[in-house]
Image (spheres, rainbow, N blue to C red):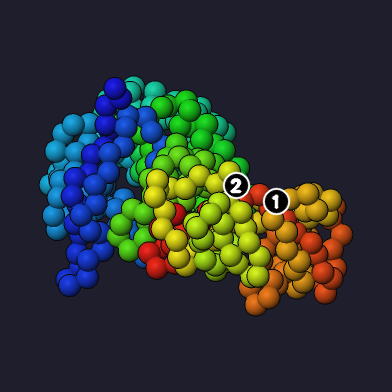
Amino acid sequence: MTANSVEIKNLDLSFGSVDVLKNLSLDIPEGEFLVLLGASGCGKSTLLNCIAGLLDLTGGQLFIKGRNVTWEEPSNRGIGMVFQSYALYPQMTVKGNLSFGLKNAKIPKPEIEERVARAAEILQMGPLLDRKPSELSGGQRQRVAIGRALVREVDVFLFDEPLSNLDAKLRADLRVEIKRLHHRLKNTMIYVTHDQIEAMTLADRIAIMKDGKIQQLSSPEEIYSNPVNKYVADFIGSPSMNFLEGVLDLSGAPLVRAHGADIPLVGYNFATEKPSAGDVVFGIRPEHIVTGEEAASAPVQFEVDVDLVEPLGSDTLVWSMLDDQRVHIRMGGKTRVKVGETLKIGFDPAMASIFDKATELRV
């Protein structure tokens, strides 16, 4: 059984009368890459700051490597943190930035040299060691910030939206480097982001947060395929999942009645053994909708009016209307669709997600 690297037990955090984190418990196994994902204000950065010791808990306990660090100083917790801003010393070289904390900790000089050289080799920063931050690109500065955490040789690395200040290409490049870093070091990493692509590509598990609570904690594949509620389903995916309001009928073979059509639920895996009939929200992802000849043989078919077309090269996103309901469709990059045309679409209900309209929980 894998030991837990970080254990959070019944954590509460309040700022005055405002409860930010509420009775939150979380176990993070040794060597896991966990991503805290959510919209702004959901509590993900606050939770990371609690783990780092930058905020005092209102209630609960926090353990790192089996040691209660609830009231330990950040420097004594065995963590290395990378912030959104690079926070480098402008007057120092890269080498000076990497070694500064080690010198203050009275680490012997030969060991400092060894750690800096190792970090530079891992992050491919050898040619940059004698430069100052003003002479570096944004991606290079963030690599230095990661290296500064790396030289500490800690048990747990914390990343607070480290790529959000970079342009799209640099984000993609550095995302690959962080994943390679985790594969090489096998340390526990906790990563905060609002970017679902970062979450899906980096994480062993994702914790999706809302209003200071974890909505779902699971692998990227499970969260994408079986979201536990409508919020998670809507948050994961770009464009987000299509939602059609309907009624679940269980009087015979299960089906959903929506927009004048009966949608048979052949192959759909219900989340509960005894689902209840009634008002539901039927969800289908844009990439699971087919058109043309495939639509003609699909179990469920609709006709929609094309409202907007977004060519993206490898994909084409089509925005359409089904009655008064907007429907997004992801099609191939060479697809030729015109605004105003009527398009036949289809899908397999086995790929759908169905949510109770009142509770928004998966049915």
Residue 246 located left or right of residue 71: right
Q: Report whether 273 appears left or right of 290.
A: left
Q: Earlier in the sequence, mark 1 or mark 2?
A: 2
User: Quick check: can you spot residue 131?
Assistant: no
Q: Residue 357: percent from the left, percent from the top?
A: 44, 67
Q: Closer to the camera, 227 or 102?
A: 227
Residue at 36% in and 54% down: 215
User: x, y percentage for residue 204?
Assistant: 45, 36
For the residue marked with disc 2, what is the amino acid? Val
Q: Quadrant of residue 213?
A: bottom left
Is residue 201 visible in the rendered structure shown here? yes
Q: Residue at x 48, y 32 (%)?
A: 181
22 relative to 224, above or below: below
> Would you name the residue on which mark 2 appears?
266
Give the label on residue 299, or none: 1
The secondary element bearing badge 2 is classed as loop
Given the image, on which type of amino acid does mark 1 rest? Pro
Q: Are marks 1 and 2 in contact (CB under 8 Å)?
A: yes
Which residue is rendered at x = 71% and y = 67% of the image?
Answer: 319
Q: Is residue 126 left or right of residue 67?
A: right
